[in-house]
Image (cartoon, grey):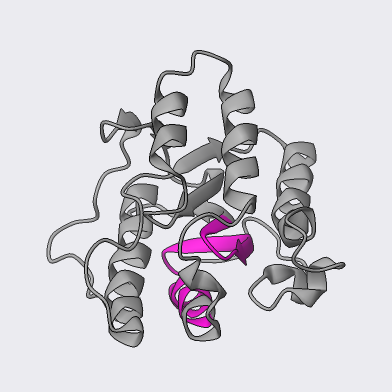
Amino acid sequence: MHDSDPPSGPPAHRGWHSRGYLPHFDSPDLIQAITFRLVDALPRHVVEALANDIEADADRRDRVEAFLNAGYGACYLADPRIGSLVEEAMLYWDMHRYRLLAWVVMPNHVHAVLETVEGHPLSEVLQAWKSYTAKAANRLLGRDGSFWHPDYFDRFIRDERHLARAVDYVHWNPVRAGLVDDPVGWPYTSARLPPRNAGSGP
């Protein structure tokens, strides 16, 4: 991923904000668990039902995760060319614009746990990942049009215990989805690597 740095000073972290879909919280040196998905990963009736859902956010996230793990849509990320492309794009600016602590590229969505870095807001990190991989994936697949859903889920990590649970959740996602029997058996995940620690980068 070879996007250039912004020409002026570093962009400001925005605190609580929304792009018209979901609320987000962005602050430097904050550890976040994020989920983003392909544009067709959820059927329209599910998206509409979730938009009208008044239950707790945790319940909503659980239902979204269940739908995502069902493998709806084209599941382009299951293509080894695309799965590896997305993983490599996420790793490209690791330890510079953010610190990746855990990740998994699923067939139709991505989970990551990362620590934000001053001057690189989470929304811009996600936009850079999506913009680069959408163009490259469409080229590889011989298609055009939208690739990623425009928004994402994020949840800031409260403490070490919460972090351990979040990393475990990410690593075991392919097992919960019935894709492999062991987390290390999935090809696009940090479960294959030594554990990463927060706050160890620049």
In the picture provided, is 131 more to the left or to the right than 43?
A: left
Q: Which residues are magenta?
A: 84-111
* Quarter placement of the N terminus: bottom left
Is residue 94 something that shows in the picture? no
Is residue 130 something that shows in the picture? yes
Q: Name the residue rendered at 80%, 39% in the picture.
A: 161
Decide which of 113, 60 is in the foreground and name it. Answer: 60
* Picture coordinates of residue 119, whole percent (x, y): 33, 54
Decide which of 84, 178 is in the foreground and name it. Answer: 178
Q: Name the residue rendered at 58%, 55% in the picture.
A: 111
Q: Name the residue rendered at 73%, 73% in the picture.
A: 186
In the picture provided, is 99 more to the left or to the right than 160?
A: left
Quarter assignment of residue 175: bottom right
* Picture coordinates of residue 124, whole percent (x, y): 31, 54
Q: In the image, is residue 92 part of the stretch drawn in magenta?
A: yes
Q: Name the residue rendered at 32%, 63% in the picture.
A: 147
Q: How many marks?
A: 0
Q: Residue furthest left?
A: 7
Q: Residue furthest right?
A: 181
* Picture coordinates of residue 187, whole percent (x, y): 68, 78
* Picture coordinates of residue 65, whole percent (x, y): 61, 43
Q: In the image, is residue 125 part of the stretch drawn in magenta?
A: no
Decide which of 40, 92 is in the foreground and name it. Answer: 40
Q: Is residue 170 above or below residue 131?
A: above
In the picture provided, is 84 more to the left or to the right than 24?
A: right
